[in-house]
Amino acid sequence: MDFALTEEHRMVARMVRDFAEKEVAPVIKDYDRSHTVNRDAIYRMGELGLLGVCLPVRYGGQGMDYVSLGLVCEELERVDTSLRVVMSVHVGLNCLGLFQWATQEQKQRYLIPQARGERIATYGLTEPGAGSDAAAIATTARREGDVYVLNGEKMWISLANVADQFVIFAKTDPRATPSHEGMSAFIVQREMQGLTTGDIHGKLGVRAGSTGWISLNDVEVPAENRLGEEGEGFKIAMSCLDNGRYTVAAGATGLIRACLEASVAYAHERKTFGREIGKHQLIQQLIAFMQRDYDIARLLCLRVGWMKNEGVRNSREVSLAKWFATEASFSAASNAVQLHGAYGYSDEYDVERYLRNAKGACIYEGSSQIHQLIQAGYALGYRDDHPLRCELPAYDAEAWQNDSC
């Protein structure tokens, strides 16, 4: 197990850092204050190849590995969470789900334009009455000849009002026992009749990101757009969440780093009692906590990236990385605000935004409480990684970078 970064890893990290610092950092406060999406930044992410960074060249991607995906998410969230969210839902939840589960025809039609950034995609699982209990979704998909007719509501969906394409989960057999065996997945396009979306207003954080709802009113989806087989929806949803959780953990690692960098700079700049505040031991304690948590979170993420590269099941490891990194990022942001004093309580400094943004990641992609139960289940032997739960294909540099394979 070697966690040393390659020159390609360092190159992509530098490229994303340069993009985020030069093109996003100068304007992010304006987008955050106005609660609007920086669509130009999303377009640039597509131009830079970030929206297909870890997909094979033959599917429109850049042919890089899963560690590269984590590094991209870390560098983006170091500047702002909203662009990492784009990576999470477009790449982690949707594109990697298609890469793992779609037919070759579906990959050609849907995955390639997504990887190129020509079409933006998201993932519709959560509903007004179904969050942590994903099997409780009420959206239905009724088979009528060559189409499925979808009806229902999705809520708290990132990019809901921006995306062109969606992976939507619905019950094809509402009477199935256990209930999760009646769930199926579908590729839905915005232009399909009966699909409407809207934004949710009044969010605490990620104000520069689109979070919204999806309404499905007799939406006719061709049977050829079903992802996987009927009844495989829950399995598909959970495998996609393993990928999404990796991107969230990596992003939270970047947020810890942002808090650390901002706090170190301010600790040298601010003076009290005749010396810079970094000389005070309790300030040093806050800095030390951030440094410790950043190193731990990054190692946990690198382990998950390495396991994904090897094609090894990582549900337990990615759950731990997501739980630790998100809780640590919220703690780091809270301590950064405290260290900045009154200035940290205003949006003059970025740490105020970091604190608001950090809280969301402790809730979505499995709340901290859900991940505690997952980790306890593994430790006690109550959870088992069933072999039918498939993993992403192992990374093969030669094959992924060759567009003729």
Image (cartoon, helix red, strand yellow):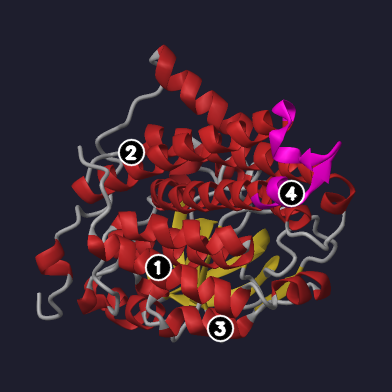
Q: Is residue 199 above or below residue 395?
A: below
- Mark before the other along the chain sequence, 2 or 1: 1
Q: Residue at x 64, y 72 (%)?
A: 25
Q: Is residue 309 visible?
A: yes
Q: Amino acid at mark 3?
A: Met
Question: Cα distance, mark 4 to mark 3?
Answer: 38 Å
User: At 56% from the left edge and 78% from the top edge, which residue is drawn?
Assistant: 22
> Is 132 in front, or is 284?
284
**First reached walking from the N terminus: tag 4 or tag 3:** 3
Instruction: Say what secondary structure mark 1 lies in.
Output: helix
Report the disc number at residue 251: none
Mark 2 element type:
loop
Region of the chain picked out in magenta, as a range = 265-282
Farthest residue, direction right: 342
Image location (x, y in percent) of residue 106: 31, 75
Question: Considering the numbered disc 4 on the image, is that residue within a helix, a strand or a loop?
Answer: helix
Separation (CA) of disc 4 from disc 1: 25 Å
Secondary element at image label 3: loop
Label annotation for residue 355: 4
Q: Are marks 2 and 4 in contact (CB under 8 Å)?
A: no
Relative to 214, is 204 above or below? above
Residue 377 lies within the magenta run: no
Q: Amino acid at mark 2?
A: Asn
The mark nearer the N terminus, 2 or 4, is 2
At x 29% / y 80%, what residue is drawn? 60
Q: Dot 2 corresponds to which residue?
A: 314
Q: Quadrant of residue 393?
A: bottom left
Q: Which mark is residue 14?
A: 1
Distance of label 2 from label 1 (alpha carbons): 27 Å
Indicate which disc residue 192 carries. Answer: 3
Q: Nearer the viewer, mark 2 or mark 4?
A: 4
Q: Residues within 10 Å of mark 2 (few under 14, many from 20)?
A: many
